[in-house]
Amino acid sequence: MRKYLLAMTAACVYTGAWAEISFENIDQAAAEVQPQVVEWRRWFHQNPELSNREFNTSARVAQILEEMGLEPLTGIAHTGVVAMIEGGKPGPLVAIRADMDGLPVTEQTGLPFASRARTEYNGQETGVMHACGHDAHMAMALGAAKVLNEMKDELAGSVMLIFQPSEEGAPVGEKGGAKLMLEEGLFSEQVPEAVFGIHIGLGAPPGEFTTKPGPLMASADRWSMKVIGRQTHGARPWGGVDPIVVSSQIIMAFQTIASRQLDVTKAPSIISVGRIQGGIRNNVIPDFVEMEGTIRAFDPAMRSYIHEAMERTARSIAESAMARVEFQVDPRGTPAVINDPALTERMYPVVQRVSGETPMLRMQPQTVAEDFSRYGEVTPSMFVFLGTLPEGVDPANAPSNHSPFFDINEDDLEQGVRLFGQLVVEYLQSEY
């Protein structure tokens, strides 16, 4: 892979006309490729695959890129695909990224190209669906690739195309996603000066974009804990150590970490318990209680503090009641998506132009997570949301991402192609 990337990012000698690419050129090209983008999106939608299992998806992406005359590299982080568009003029390298995996959701949209895929997940049979819009993300990135590749002689730099598996999270016991792509050398030979990503849905007005500099999406960490007491008769609690009472004290104390120990004016944070299980009979105090949940934060220092404070709080409360705890945070957690302030401000006029005449709102941070954040730990990055709403759907009742009814307005795909193209060209052609 290192040899491949070195060759693909080598400087090019340009012999043609030194014309610049206009935004109007990109708009026209995006309109022309739109029917093909819709076709690609429908194929991906009808053939979803779960994280680290995107074998057919990866092959289809590679095939499309090869038909453009590119030379994709496959098998990165299991099923990832990377390709390079070498510009005709010397200049920097930038990247655009799309995620590829579906979710264990049984589709109920009734679309003629709805997914009928079935698989096993966590020991249960389930449907598979692109319920988060990754089918649209791939199609928009491929559309932009086609547009930019056909204008490559005028590009003052190069473009790395990243098709990433396992954004929704690798299966238990496996590595995956953006972190594994980076570990396997994605940026080993040349680090892009900027990485751009677009996500369908999540609060933007239909057909328009929204983003903001700084923290945009929360970190996400899965935590688990076992509170160990000593079993006894429910009528004689003094004969044992009640892990249920201890667990309830710990859960309530967790809420004071965010509300009393952290500066709430700096950034919000969330500690949630998603599962708690203990005991089997009404009059038996059990030996132990198990629970797990999620931690969300926008500030890296606050995230680290929450991890430490939760373990300290749990152990202290347990010891006071002669119980003990086993606490851990899954090391595969996802950092917060933090848009590089300088890059975002620089690109903001481009996003506004593509978004439309209505002044674009700078969105509030979202407590959902995205491993696009991993690229931002290495180089400046910017993530943007594109609103979408199928025709005839009431915005107040529109199904959200991860719903079995989630769908998009395919006209909005052209917006994504335009924005990817214009972000790349603006960065490569502007002087800063």
Image (cartoon, rainbow, N blue to C red):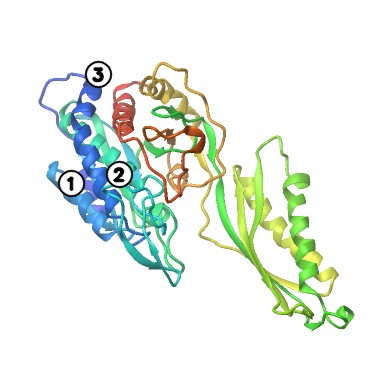
Between 43 and 83, the one nearer to me in the picture: 43
- In this rendering, the answer to whether 381 lies above or below 280 is above
Displayed quadrant of residue 381: top left
- Residue under pointer 1: 64
Q: Would residue 190 be visible to someone looking at this image?
A: no
Spatial CA span between label 2 and label 3? 23 Å
Which disc, if any, is residue 24? 3
User: Where is residue 195 shown, x and y percent of the image?
Assistant: 38, 38
Which residue type carries mark 2? Answer: Met
CA gap, disc 2 and disc 1: 11 Å
Report the side of 300 relative to 332 (left or right).
right
Marked residue nearer the N-terminal end (2 or 1):
1
In the current view of this chain or complex, which residue is farthest to the top?
357
Residue type for callout 1: Ile
Q: State which tag comes first along the sequence, 1 or 3.
A: 3
User: Secondary structure under badge 3?
Assistant: helix
308 left or right of 395? right
Q: Nearer the viewer, residue 399 or 424?
A: 399
Residue 89's x, y, as percent? Answer: 20, 28
Question: Disc 1 to disc 3, how far (Cα)?
Answer: 25 Å
How crowded pointer 1 is (Cα within 10 Å; few <14, some 14-19, many 20+) is rated as some
Residue highlighted by disc 2: 138
Q: Which residue is drawn at the image coordinates 56% and 36% (left, top)?
A: 365
Residue 370 numbered tag: none
Report the front residue among 88 and 52.
Answer: 52
Amino acid bearing label 3: Glu
State which quarter of the image contains the N terminus.
Answer: bottom left
- At x 86%, y 78%, the residue is 237
SS at badge 1 = helix
Residue 190 sits in which quadrant?
top left
Residue positioned 30% across, 44% down in the render: 138
